[in-house]
Image: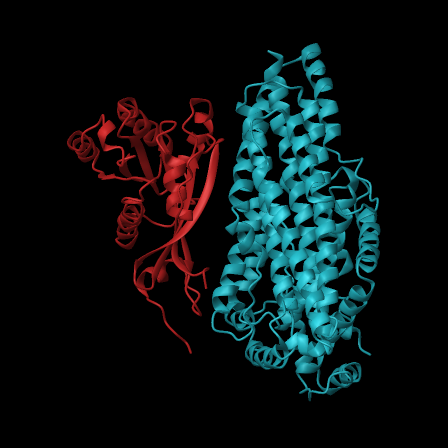
Chain colours: A red, B cyan
Amino acid sequence: MEAIWLYQFRLIVIGDSTVGKSCLIRRFTEGRFAQVSDPTVGVDFFSRLVEIEPGKRIKLQIWDTAGQERFRSITRAYYRNSVGGLLLFDITNRRSFQNVHEWLEEAKAHVQPYQIVFVLVGHKCDLDTQRQVTRHEAEKLASSFGMRYIETSARDAINVEKAFTELTRDIYELVRKGEINIQEGWEGVKSGFVPNVVHSSEEVIKSDRRCLC
Amino acid sequence: MSEKDSSENPRGSSQPPDEPGDAPSSENSTKEQKRAVSEPVAITRKRPEAKSSSEAAEQEEQKTPEKHDLDSEAKSPSGWGYWGNWGKSLISTASATVATVGHGITSAIEKAESSLGVPSPVELSIRSQEETEEGADSVQSADAKENESSSPITGALGFLSSISTAVQSTGKTVLTGGLDALEFIGKKTMDVIAEGDPGFKKTKGIINRNSTLSQVLREAKEQEELRVSSDFNAETEQKAHYGLLFDEYQGLAHLEALELLSKESDAKTKAILSSLSGEELAEVKAELEPLKEAFSLEEFDDEEELEKGDEEFTQEVTTLFDELHISARPLKLTKARIDAYKWMADVEEDGKKKKEEQAEPEDAEVQGKTSVEDIHEFAIRSLAELTACSMEMFHKAATLILHGESPVPAAARGRALSQMTILLCKELTQLSKRITTLLTITGASEKSDVLNPLITGVFLEASNSASYIQDAFQLLLPVLEISHIQSRT
């Protein structure tokens, strides 16, 4: 039954307009690549289950934000309720890489008082011949922010699963260690449901599935 | 017959539920559940009602000590707690149906419920305990009522069975009459509402209260998830959960996003208005008045309408969307609608073919024909999808009104959105009529207690859907207000 998962994480995907945020998410959630797509209006929503260990599933709620400047004020409202994020730039567009810093600053300013785990994603890695940002400099930037760096392609389905799953695992570890907690009035992490046993949020962490049958 | 047999007189729920008498009650509910499981029932979900936070907390307190008892019920939708909800949902839906006729009376419903005296599951459980202690008298009278049922009824179960019988027979009446009966209850509810709240016509949806619609829906969905997961291994696995499907189609997320925009706009409008004074303030207020009128949905007539063709519906939605002058297209919505009708047409076609091929219709039933359960599941899914798409459309409209390029008079946009709301609600009515007709035809050889709950379920979710759409529409008013104020300067 689809409805069963251990936690629900809310992730936000940000980055300049046209770096391929919606395409990346659609590849991940729908398994296909849309050649042409309209620019995102405000924010869109997707979800998918991810199995991080056998039997341990996490539901990801993915918030796809508009990169366009005119929707920026809307996007800002969504940082607060996210536990993780993918910060995208286009490896063939130097400008989008330079703006990474700005995106991060904005996220930090609006996520308070909660924390948010980011992964830096260099997108469109299938277009290696048009590359304007080297892997080395992107890795360097990511490590200076204390993030992972990963290169993806929605068109060729490269590393798309990996990007989302690794971020999910990182967040799960932090939740397991108690560094990120479920909080009232915060949508970032929600506890899910395990068959036959109704857990309180704390119990979910300690106990595995118990079968009453 | 003792007064307690009547399900119309709930007792005060002030009695603490965790008294020693609790244990037998849980036993009873398990027995009752076993008995009830054999009755085929569909899940008819109650439209979630917003509670004021204090009320909610109070209820929470009452429920907590009973949790273990309730858990056993939660596994089966047929537990008597479910029946309690059923009665409640019937009434709230009756009034929701009325709401589709044009008055945003959702917030008055609670009042109606309490004055109609539908007992909550918690109250029922308390009463069942009392009933156990009361002894044989009431049991006998309950037994007398229960003569339809062949199963032996132990003393403690008498009362419970009588409730479910009462509810079932009410259910039958409602279903025989279909919409007429729902309308009748709706009218009754309206009277009660009118008595209790003379100004009810001005009462707008849930949104004006402490908790927002999306919160209420989210809580309802979470409860449904809980129920689904505890149902996991149960034989009576139900596939169609409106709340879960509505969320799957991202309806909740879009609604929540729309609420966020609405709230922000409202705050901005208030801040601006409070900074104005004298003539200017009066002027702005006068300008906002026609906007409010567009949101009263007064032209929402109840005329019988013919079913629209795919193109006609798509055309109408597109035209209205064009009037909004925003750069988005309602493709998802029109596609969802087309898919729904195509599926139904296919099933109808299949049904006809099968009938021609097979002389005996009973054989056709056995041979992989689309079952009534399939149609029911499809109906709930379609309603959830269409409603979710409507949420998305309203959310996108709000986003583009606030951050779009071409300024159009807010009142014109308000009128277009209001027309859109009416169109969508009518569409839901048409769709549910079509599906229930299909259910009736397909399930002609089914017993009425299999078919009727399914039909009721479809009608309930259709009118719930219409109420969600109207509540979402109301969220657009602050958005248009601020857009109007900002376009003045």
Image-quadrant location for residue A145: top left
Image label count: 0
> Residue sitting at 68 percent across and 16 percent down?
B284
Along the viewing direction, whichever of B242 and B282 lies nearer the viewer: B242
In the rendered image of this protein, does residue A187 appear above or below residue B115? above
Residue B481, percent from left and from top? 64, 24
In the rendered image of this protein, does residue B125 appear above or below residue B465? below
Residue B297, percent from left and from top? 76, 36
> Residue sitting at 45 percent across and 45 percent down?
A46
Residue A196, percent from left and from top? 44, 70
Residue B10, can we see it? no
**Left/right of residue A89 with respect to residue B44 in the rendered view:** left
> Residue sitting at 65 percent across and 27 percent down?
B322
Q: Which residue is the extreme one toward the front?
A: B357
Residue A102, can we see it? yes
In the rendered image of this protein, does residue B51 appear above or below residue B296? below
Along the viewing direction, whichever of B151 and B232 lies nearer the viewer: B232
> Residue sitting at 72 percent across and 32 percent down?
B295
- Image quadrant where one finds the C terminus of chain B: top right
Image-quadrant location for residue B94: bottom right
In the rendered image of this protein, does residue A134 appear above or below residue B27? above
